[in-house]
Image: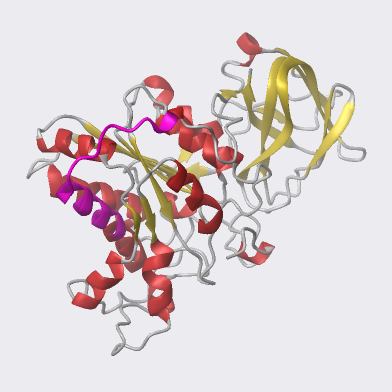
């Protein structure tokens, strides 16, 4: 399977993608699927790509059985956000998986098991790693026992070719409480995902891996007599996202892993974080810089970027039915100032810019300069819906002082542009 996909197969760039993947049509009716059949169980069994080293996951399961606090976290794109599920916050695979884990291991009450859901539509692991400490670890307030990472259909255009993905895996693995890290490989209607690129990371660190692709793709071609359980029309509500039935299947695939690990003998404690990287670990120590903390980290001249944008992409986090605005501590150029630049001086060796995409014609293009040299052009109409876009500005081996300037391009000075934040490695 190819490690890249044409734009039409890229969630963040597909020309046929919905304007906003969180806005989904109501299903016409629920498919008549026998979730108790042997064929269904056979399909789910195929999803278990690897149990990996089970030490960490068994530890989380045993904690839940003792009634101790267990936090199950999910980070990914719009499928993890819940796109296609109705209602999104209760029928998405993340909520269903968390609820299944509770019912399997935490008894009738289940109040000791908590959910962190941090899926954001149309975004790759390059943005996920910038968000991880804020949205998953809650800036140090949370210590997940289980972290499910789902970027198998979002990373086609990852500029780092897996470096950010592996760095995110290592960032999760490296937490002091040693959480179980599960790699989840979702799939598009075209049968495409990036499992061939990403699964080697899981093999390398002996991680549990669950493949929705392995479960459903073959049986899509079968007749009922051959063992077909669900058709593509029943599994997908569009070419990207699962229906309620699809989300349930994803949850049951994770449930298969939970069941197998629970029934297996414990492995010797792993030391996955001590292994050398397979692709790269350049972004493990990345931190978020925004208006909230920027002045403590860098020398900032806001120039004409003095306003805060409140029209932001939102995501229903955790089990919430309401959307949380993403990157509220931002800098926005409105075009009303006589200054059309933003300047920041920062000691670092790696830097990712997160800026806002928008379908609003009021937004214009900006050029990005590092140490006096133009390195990128940021076009907020690349996707054309309100969306967070992460781009790499530099990746160097030594820490040095860098001056970053974001300038509105010629004839764009009266336009808006929003800097949502930066991810930096010191």
Q: At x 31% / y 64%, what residue is drawn?
A: 249
Quadrant occupied by the N terminus: bottom right
Q: At x 51% / y 66%, what residue is drawn?
A: 188
Q: Is residue 288 above or below residue 50?
A: above
Viewer-side residue, 70 vs 407: 70
Horizontally, residue 139 falls left or right of residue 369, namely left
Image coords of residue 11 (percent x, y): 58, 58
Quadrant occupied by the C terminus: top right
Horizontally, residue 377 falls left or right of residue 242, namely right
Q: Is residue 192 above or below residue 426?
A: below
Q: Residue at the right extreme?
A: 410
Image coords of residue 196 (percent x, y): 53, 58
Q: Residue at the left extreme?
A: 108
Horizontally, residue 342 falls left or right of residue 247, namely right
Image coords of residue 181 (percent x, y): 37, 40
Is residue 251 visible in the rendered image? The answer is yes
Viewer-side residue, 276 vs 181: 276
Q: Is residue 236 magenta?
A: no
Most prominent secondary structure in the magenta stretch? helix
What span is in magenta? Answer: 253-273
Q: Is residue 258 magenta?
A: yes
Q: At x 84% / y 28%, what residue is drawn?
A: 369
Horizontally, residue 358 falls left or right of residue 166, namely right
Image coords of residue 58 (percent x, y): 21, 39
Is residue 128 visible in the rendered image? The answer is no
Q: At x 88% / y 37%, what residue is drawn?
A: 409
């Amino acid at each position: 399977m190819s490690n890249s996909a044409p734009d039409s197969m890229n969630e963040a760039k597909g020309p046929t993608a919905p304007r906003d993947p969180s806005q989904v049509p109501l299903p016409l009716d629920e498919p008549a699927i026998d979730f108790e059949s042997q064929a269904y169980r056979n399909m789910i069994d195929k999803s278990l790509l690897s149990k990996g080293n089970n030490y960490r996951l068994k530890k989380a399961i045993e904690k839940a059985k003792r009634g101790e606090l267990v936090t199950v976290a999910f980070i990914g794109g719009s499928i993890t956000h819940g796109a296609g599920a109705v209602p999104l916050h209760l029928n998405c695979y993340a909520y269903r998986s968390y609820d299944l884990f509770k019912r399997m291991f935490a008894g009738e009450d289940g109040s000791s098991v908590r959910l962190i859901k941090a899926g954001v539509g149309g975004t790759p692991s390059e943005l996920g790693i910038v968000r991880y400490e804020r949205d998953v670890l809650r800036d140090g307030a949370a210590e997940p026992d289980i972290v499910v990472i789902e970027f198998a259909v979002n990373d086609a255009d990852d500029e780092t070719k897996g470096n950010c993905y592996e760095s995110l895996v290592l960032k999760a693995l490296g937490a002091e409480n040693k959480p179980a890290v599960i790699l989840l490989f979702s799939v598009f209607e075209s049968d495409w995902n990036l499992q061939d690129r990403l699964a080697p990371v899981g093999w390398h660190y002996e991680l549990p891996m669950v493949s929705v692709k392995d479960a459903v793709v073959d049986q899509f071609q079968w007749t009922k007599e051959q063992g077909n359980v669900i058709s593509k029309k029943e599994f997908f509500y569009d070419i990207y996202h699962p229906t309620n039935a699809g989300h349930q299947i994803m949850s049951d695939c994770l449930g298969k892993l939970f069941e197998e690990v629970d029934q297996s003998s414990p492995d010797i404690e792993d030391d996955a974080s001590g292994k050398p990287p397979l692709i790269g670990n350049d972004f493990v120590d990345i931190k978020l810089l925004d208006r909230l903390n920027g002045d403590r980290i860098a020398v900032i001249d806001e120039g004409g970027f003095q306003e805060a944008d409140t029209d932001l992409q939102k995501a229903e986090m955790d089990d919430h039915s309401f959307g949380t605005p993403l990157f509220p501590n931002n800098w926005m150029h409105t075009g009303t100032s006589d200054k059309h630049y933003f300047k920041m001086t920062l000691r670092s060796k790696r830097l990712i810019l997160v800026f806002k995409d928008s379908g609003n014609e009021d937004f214009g293009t900006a050029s990005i300069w590092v140490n006096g040299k133009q390195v990128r052009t940021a076009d907020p109409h690349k996707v054309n819906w309100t969306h967070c876009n992460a781009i790499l500005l530099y990746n160097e081996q030594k820490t040095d002082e860098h001056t970053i300037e974001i300038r509105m391009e010629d004839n764009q000075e009266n336009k808006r542009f929003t800097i949502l934040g930066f991810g930096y490695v010191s």
